[in-house]
Image (cartoon, rainbow, N blue to C red):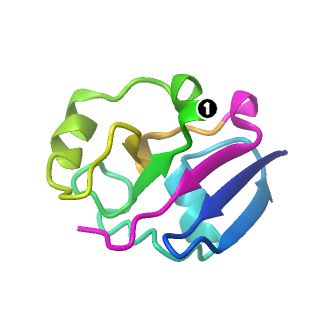
Amino acid sequence: MIRVRFIAHDASEREIEIEADGSLMQVAKSNSVPGIDADCGGACSCATCHVFVDHEWLDRVGPIGQWEESMLGLTPDRQPNSRLSCQIQLSGKLDGLVVTTPEFQY
């Protein structure tokens, strides 16, 4: 089991303890985390599962792929720590992961 902490744009927090498999987006949707729309269902063909990864965790979530880079280009509030949660695969090394959801998904 691993823990993931989701922080909403209004600073409210929710910590979820889950099995370390699947994507961060799947966990968010399965647990009704507000702020993750995931309109494409995890196909990396939109940017509605955009999150800001806490800087301490950036090296552990893995590099941004070409498709993810393209989709993040669609978000007007992109930041250096922006990622698509559908592209973050959960594993034991992400126990304690902290992400923040943007105010709006595009």
Taking the image as shown, residue 33 lies to the left or right of residue 75, namely right
Question: Residue 46: where, in percent of width, then height?
Answer: 23, 57
Q: Residue most toward the right?
A: 1
Segment tinted magenta in the rendering: 91-106
Tell which of 25 and 73 is nearer to you: 73
Residue found at x 59% / y 45%: 22
- Residue shown at 41% from the left, 39% from the top: 81
Q: How many marks?
A: 1
Give the position of the N terminus as an image quadrant.
top right
Q: Residue at the location (25% across, 57% down)?
A: 77
Q: Residue beneath label 1, please?
A: 56
Q: Position of residue 50 (x, y in %)?
A: 37, 56
Badge 1: residue crowd in 10 Å (few <14, some 14–19, many ≥20): few
Give the answer, above or below, for where 24 lies relative to 10.
Answer: above
View extreme (front): residue: 11
- Look at the numbered disc 1 and give the secondary structure of its residue: helix
Type of the residue with mark 1:
Glu
